[in-house]
Amino acid sequence: MDKKELGEMMIAGTDEFYRIAKSILKEDADCQDAVQEAVSKAFAKIDTLREKKYAKTWFTRILLNECYGMLRQRKREASYNEQISREEADQHQYSDLYQKIMALEIEYRMPLVLYYLNQYTIKEIGQMLNLGESAVKMRLSRARKMMRRMYEQEDAV
Amino acid sequence: MSERNSWDMDFPETPESFRLALKQQVEKEITDDENEDKANAGMSHANGKVKKQNEQNKHDKRSRSNASRRRWQSVKVAAAALALIGIISGGVYAVTKSDISLLVGREVDETNAEPYLTMDTSAFNQTVIPGWPQTMIDIYGEDRASEIKGIEEPLLNVTQVYYDGLSLAFYAKPTSAGKKYNLDADRLVIGDAVYMIQFYQLPDEYIKEHPELGLEKGDYRGTVELGGREIPDSFTASLVESVDYIGTQTISFDVKLDENAVIKPKKTVTISNGIQASVDVLKIAASGTYIHVTWEFDESQKSLYDQFTGGEETDQILFMALDDNNGNHFTTEENGDTSQAIVITADGDDWSGAENSQYEKDGKYYYETYSIIEGMNQDVTSLTVTPYVRTGVEDGEEHTYTNLDFAAFTVEYGE
């Protein structure tokens, strides 16, 4: 894969990459920082990408690392969670769904976003998150249950 | 799945600023490289100083433009001001077993882990070479390797290494040169294979909360699971370390497996119905057990094989229940979160991780499954493997479990 093709892949996947970054970092400015860093790193490391078919998975791993790195640097690793306050939700008009996704632990949140929003297969998600396929399936299953529970609790109120 | 489409509507829309930022960065990367190529072509008659200056300009330019969006990196720059204290030598720190769990990243058997931890840095025989190690050159080719700019000055010192036959984990301290950069590594070379590893700078909280580890701000940690590979007891691991726009260097260190490690020989049994089953790999380590099992079916057993694979049933997952002679019971179902490293060799990439594979070969059908079992640390003389399948997971329904007793088997290892 040459640099032009890599660039095209990145631009074509803009929405997917935003969702990934936004699932970890709530601030759009941070998402931008992370994706720019990831793009820089991917171009610098393109020599190590042998097969074109892995390009998106490979870049997603780089982007995830950047996002996690930013969280760590900001001393929030303990929870790996960026909580959204009611004020922020109102200010940004975040949907109910997004607020609920962000309320999940990151280990459940990421498979959910990658599967439902970015339409990746279980195998691809496993490659991105360095998990076995059965682990991805289990996390998806648990995440769905947690989401359902949140909606049920809301309905009950 | 309709749920998938409806989610699209409810997730925050990609802001134009993000779209633009990504596009601009991509264009910048491509333009920078094109300019460099042109400059190099035009200056081919000039001496090396010109090219060097171009590279320096390119680096400076990138550094300047990146500065504003690398706000968080100021923390790392500040860290560079800290003095480097000497390399930790063996016995200086009283390492507890829970510390080893921290290093490995999951629960490690507290009574047996210590022999696998090395803190005597002289045992590592650390060496540094600029650029890629030979294995990377063999895999990726001379052309690509020639584009890699080497870094001569050592960037890291490996300070602690843990290896129990399954998990390899290490701490490394940046040198004064290394502290100037954000060090990046995702590849570790062992023999003829490249492993994708987890490697990152430790958060300040981690270091503050665990002073007993003898770590300092800016130290790094690397981890990789090696259970699924045939690796000699003693080997050299080469960490391919890169710094954006500056270059790459390979830091090699020796790793030796303690003689107490339990690695069982391959065992094959024929089950009463003619199915062949084998435990190809059984490594029992302080950080868990790695097991690889293969079932072989002939044509007459195809219907049994289909029960393994689930046919078109995509939400079926096969697990193994393991019962050992010590009275312990484990399942791979409870141990799905740790997978093998992605491995790259000259023969191809293996991105499968710790997954089941099913295939047909020479008229026979094979089902392979492997797993890392956390908490399985005790040596065994016999092990019973019972496969079972679970369905219903994809739609969050109640799970349905079915034992595949026809393929259950026991292997004996003797005393």
Image (cartoon, rainbow, N blue to C red):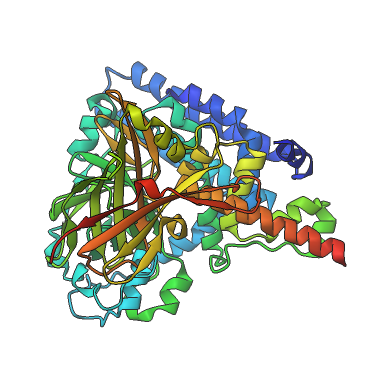
Q: Is residue B82 visible?
A: no
**Pick the front one: B2 or B153:** B2
Residue at 74% from the left image edge and 56% from the top image edge: A148
Q: In the rendered view, does B47 fall on the left or right side of B210?
A: left
Q: Position of residue B149 (x, y in %)?
A: 28, 37
Residue at 23% from the left image edge and 62% from the top image edge: B382
Q: Position of residue B142 (x, y in %)?
A: 22, 26
Quarter of the image with the N terminus of chain A is top left
**Pick the front one: B402 or B314:** B402
Quarter of the image holding residue B283? bottom left
| Location of residue B71 with respect to B367 vertically, above or below | below
Q: In the rendered view, does A99 fall on the left or right side of B241?
A: right
**Pick the front one: B106 or B285:** B285
Quarter of the image with the C terminus of chain A is bottom right
Quarter of the image holding residue B220? bottom left
Outermost residue toward the front in this view: B272
Q: Position of residue B187 (x, y in %)?
A: 32, 45
